[in-house]
Amino acid sequence: MSDVMDARSFALLATALANRYRIERELGAGGMATVYLAQDLKHDRKVAIKVLKPELAAVLGADRFVVEIKTTAALQHPHILPLFDSGEADGLLYYVMPYIQGETIREKLNRETQFGVDEAVRVAREVADALDYAHRHGVIHRDIKPENILLHDGSAMVMDFGIALAVSAAAGGRMTETGLSLGTPHYMSPEQATAEREITARSDVYSLASVLYEMLAGDPPFTASSAQAVIMKIITEPASPVTVRRKVVPSNVAAAVARALEKLPADRFESAKAFGDALANPAFSFGPHGGGAHDHESRVWKRATIVTGGVAMILGAALVVSAIRRPASVTATNREPIRFGLSDDPSLHVDVSFTHPFAISPDGRSVVFRASTDSTAMQLWVRTLDEAAARPLAGTEAGANAAFSEDGKWIAFLSDLKLVKKVRATGGEVTTVTAIEGLSAGLSWSSDTLILIEQIGNDDGMQRVNASGGRVELAIPKDSAAGEVRQRRPMILPGTDIVVYGSYGAAGGEPTLVMYRLRDGARRRTGLTGHGALALIDDHLVYAQSDGTLMAVAIDVKGMRIVGQPVRLSTRVAFGAPGTSVALSQSGVLVYRPAGTASLARLDLVDMAGRVRTLHGVAPFVGAPRFSRDGRKVAVGMSANGGIARALRVTTSDLWMIDVASGEETRLTSNNDVAQPSWFPDGQRLVYLKAAGNGFEVQSHRLDGSTPPSQLVALTGIPYGADLTADGRVLVVRTGDVSQSAIRGALVRVSLDAPTRVDTLLEATAKLRPEYTRISPDGQWILFVDRATYDVWVRSLRDSSMMMVSAQVSLDSPPVWGPDSRTLYYRSAAGMSVIELTTSPRLGVAHRGAIRGLPTGAAFDLSPDGKTFAMVTPAQRSGGAVIVVDWANAARREWNRSVRK
């Protein structure tokens, strides 16, 4: 059984459908679904139930999927496998088909390599008849391939008819969030391969011709070592005549296949029926006078002229494109953007938790990101878009927040967020440029001579250093007159010394964009609100707002002024605590995590040796798991159906309890507004934050439901974090003021024996903003993360002594205590780090170390015995990240439409 649809999911499905179907066993698993054999209890017949993968179901939603799939249920044809039923069961989306004993074309090809010519033609004609019927009823299959054609008693039956359409429509264009894709590259039509919006019946004709080609020749028309390379061939290369592969194929069949494989839809058969008729007509020909074999290649290049300018960057066909003369009527903005995942490597875990998770070269050909594999630690990886796979950059362990040089040949990055280093984009020796006082959140590299440093906790402003090394100097002083307290996400406009950055004021709220000229210190506040600039494309500055909305505005670079009205673009990116997950090249290639991307993950139990036991399969987990005091239960947040986007924005969820021994799960809340659970010592009650009004309140919840959840304490201000002592008598809360200011609020201690007694432990300031609090098991210490710098601090609960014990950590993975109340565990750029504290005669650090061999995860907790981690392990290895080539074309159309209005 697959690791996604595990035994627990099987049991969930069996229970949910028990009154209609008896689930017997798993038949197999594919890219989008797992198939089960079941007994239809009402009609006493065998059926096959396909259950969509959880990561796909998470972005579809039950209602729209069921509505869309109904359009296929009315299809009744002898060569179409009918759809009996469909629906939703406890969050699982499924559809039901007859169970037919037989084999698919794929299974027969795997066994025999090729079909007999007569049999292949007969099967293709039967499929063409089914397609013609569906097309006349307004349904296009979109995913014709050997796996979707069943052979029953020698006759063809097309499966999953219209399922691809239902999934695509229901997903509303968000398929990239799932890490899955529609269509199989070898059988995609060119218009599918280039992501054209309008797919017609002629696309199915192309796919069927590809299947017939493989039945005859033993291979599909185009093969290559990667999916991207296959797509490039589909778009640019003519298919070899099938007779080159198998000489006995009749001339009319070869001619029909050639015409059906034409690149331009208009050059193919007008219908599936016409294709089937040509296969049966010995007189059919498709030669040079009919616009066929001899001028096939010219039409291929005509097609390539239109679509491959961007695709070539993906697939390494730069030489091809340079040899093509683009017709004058085709402009750059005519090309549709092409989207694909950042990585198809299932062993690669992409880390999106840092301030700048992606960097992209100015020409858009290379992307740098942090990642690890199951056997290697985190380091920087490079995905060059003309290569099928990413490659690691040796020597970049503990590297993060990278930036490309202006010529794209070098990559600067931060090591442990304290050292600026550089390495060639092709790999090689890593050189240290400079050390930083304090920490840095990011870099911007304008030329071979200047690296701009976005510093954390620096009172003066943005820093600069020569790329060859040297002293760090002040580059952009803070604008004290405007109340500026932080400068974030700098971008140096190409070919200039003008920097655009996000300026934060003391009152918090949305930052504003500022333009600053380095040579003379001229500064202009643009009046635009934005988290930071991304690129200058044509004369438009593209920037991101803090809610993830991308904007564009026309600017006069020399005059350092805005000359147009801001335009809201349709692209929205994921926004979290570290920052917006997006990078944009000057050439218009975008890499980003879409807003609302489901944080699909597993909940794993991992021992100190790295051995893993999955406690819960794939789900949209939110926040850190929390062991009960006896280690027998884990409380964890999961976003409810329809609540994923909200959960990611405000880190709230429904609370679930999972039994460690049995894996049995219990849903505790149903309001989709709960965060940060903490256990009472009896294991029967929980404390958590619950959304209330414009903020949260601290609530107590009994597991047995004998009393309703209730407010535990009344506090002045809004609580943003809470934790209980092991004896359940003291609560430490991080509060904020009613305006949710970035720097106001405090850590307070509340005695539950006397809830009105509140002691202030630490007032928040602009330099120190405590969050993510955890009390040590002995109740003597409290750790917290400084929200201003992401540093880890420890403070005594007996007196006022405290100290900073660690540099920047990921806010997606707050630190935890070991059972001895002297050891801290936290995720850092280097992996899982460990700090051993000494408390006598004063608080200090006795030892620093790391645990090797642990899987890469996000939020985690440690069992009370200190032997096992509960880890939220991302199920989307690419981090949900998407690359979009020719993204700028769509953006141009949007801002041009705005101007015309």
Image: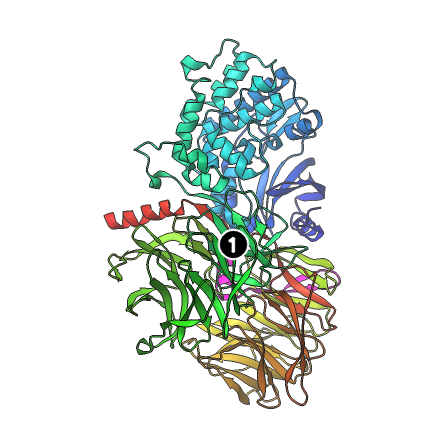
Would residue 140 be seen by someone viewing this image from the given angle? no
Question: In the rendering, at what x and y percent does residue 766 appear?
Answer: 44, 79
Q: Nearer the viewer, residue 481 or 625?
A: 481
- Mark 1 = which residue? 424
Q: Badge 1 local density, few (<14 within 10 Å), some, or many (20+)?
A: some
Question: In the rendering, at what x and y percent does residue 845 appear?
Answer: 65, 80
- Eyeballing the image, is 407 above or below 579? above
Question: In the rendering, at what x and y percent does residue 612 appear?
Answer: 72, 58
Would residue 556 be seen by someone viewing this image from the given angle? yes
Amino acid carrying mark 1 in the image: Arg
Query: In the displayed structure, does residue 109 sit left or right of residue 56?
Result: right
- Eyeballing the image, is 58 above or below 852? above
Q: Nearer the viewer, residue 806 or 95?
A: 806
Magenta stretch: includes residue 745: no
Q: Quadrant of residue 872?
A: bottom right
- Eyeballing the image, is 570 above or below 746? above
- Residue at the spot x=67%, y=65% of the render? 870
Q: Residue furthest top?
A: 283
Secondary structure found at label 1: strand
- Eyeballing the image, is 142 above or below 649? above
Question: In the rendering, at what x and y percent does residue 119 appear?
Answer: 63, 18
- Residue at the spot x=67%, y=86% of the render? 839
Magenta residues span: 643-668
- Residue at the spot x=66%, y=22% of the render? 114
